[in-house]
């Protein structure tokens, strides 16, 4: 499995964009980048995923560098409810039978 | 109603007791997963099932067993609970390897 590196914690002001980085320098060609978040011991929640191209949905945007060795999750207008631990996961789920391997994530604190 | 439910939500038991955690889903997904989470750590996969007849061990299956009673139900058993099995347990479902996983609310287990 490709490993990911994320900062352990970040702060963001409410209403501002939150940019969460993830390094995955050993990612292989068939591996996707997935982002999940976990709000205070609730079940993890899927945010977004991508392979090569940048992706956007109603929750966030995912920017993947051209060499695919790193990515950034962007929450465009962070709110207090976005305070959570954010997990960047790199996986070729088809080859792994759908297993997600969670690291320690980034604890994002959105402050008023 | 929640798509993925777990019972019980909280449980206290004693060392050596048998305990079963149950997971039900109404999403119609074939794939189901059990994870555990220890304080300050990410999730670790215990068992996963692709359909009723297909069950696979995850990273940390020792001390656990599972039963897939139906497409919608996946139970996790601790045959003889021990204190280091104190953790937060999550069930998840998905529709295919590439798709997102949907998590239940979790079961908080304390083994004394």
Image: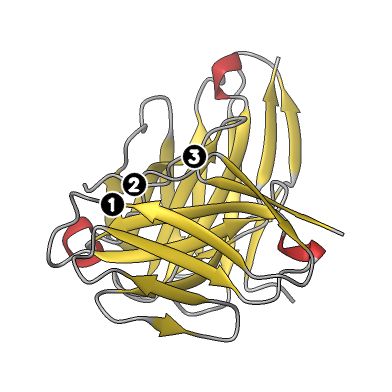
**Mark 3 surroundings: few (<14), some (14-19) or many (≥20) residues within 10 A:** some
| Residue B101 or residue A38, whichever sits in front | A38
Contact flag, marks 2 and 3 (Cβ < 8 Å): no
Q: Which residue is mark 1?
A: A24
| Residue A38 or residue A22, whichever sits in front | A22
- Judge from the rendering whether residue A88 lies leftward or rightward of residue A15; answer left or right: left
Task: Tell me where residue A103 sits by quadrant.
Answer: top left
In the displayed structure, B6 sits above or below B20; it is below
The reply to whether residue B52 is in sight is no
Tell me which residue sits at (70%, 38%) in the image.
B108
Circle 3 chain: A
Q: Which residue is mark 2?
A: A4
Contact flag, marks 2 and 1 (Cβ < 8 Å): yes
Tell me which residue sits at (55%, 63%) in the image.
A19
From the top left corner, tell me how far across and down residue A18 is, in percent: 62, 64
**Label 2 or label 1, whichever comes before in sequence order:** 2
**Tag of residue A104:** 3
Q: Secondary structure at mark 1?
A: loop
Tell me which residue sits at (62%, 30%) in the image.
B39
Spatial CA span between label 1 and label 3: 14 Å
Q: Secondary structure at mark 2?
A: loop
From the top left corner, tell me how far across and down residue B98 is, in percent: 30, 73
**Label 2 or label 3, whichever comes before in sequence order:** 2
- Judge from the rendering whether residue A67 lies leftward or rightward of residue B30; answer left or right: left
Circle 1 chain: A
Spatial CA span between label 2 and label 3: 10 Å
């Amino acid at each position: 499995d490709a490993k990911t590196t994320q900062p352990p914690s970040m702060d963001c002001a409410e209403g501002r964009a939150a940019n969460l980085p993830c390094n995955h320098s050993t990612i292989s060609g068939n591996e996707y980048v997935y982002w999940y978040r976990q709000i205070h011991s609730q079940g993890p929640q899927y945010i977004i995923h991508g392979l090569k191209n940048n992706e956007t949905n109603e929750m966030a945007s995912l920017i993947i560098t051209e060499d695919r060795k790193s990515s950034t999750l962007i929450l465009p207008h962070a709110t207090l409810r976005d305070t959570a631990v954010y997990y960047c996961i790199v996986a070729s789920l088809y080859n792994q039978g759908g297993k997600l391997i969670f690291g320690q994530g980034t604890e994002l604190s959105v402050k008023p | 109603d929640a798509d993925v439910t777990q019972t019980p939500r909280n449980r206290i038991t004693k060392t050596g007791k048998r305990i079963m955690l149950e997971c039900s889903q109404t999403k119609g997904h074939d794939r189901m997963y059990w994870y555990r989470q220890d304080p300050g750590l990410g999730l670790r996969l215990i068992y996963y099932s692709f359909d009723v007849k297909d069950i696979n061990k995850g990273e940390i299956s020792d001390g656990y067993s599972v039963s897939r009673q139906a497409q919608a139900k996946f139970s996790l058993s601790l045959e003889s609970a021990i204190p280091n099995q104190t953790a937060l347990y999550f069930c998840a479902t998905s529709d295919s390897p590439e798709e997102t996983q949907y998590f239940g609310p979790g079961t908080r287990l304390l083994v004394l």
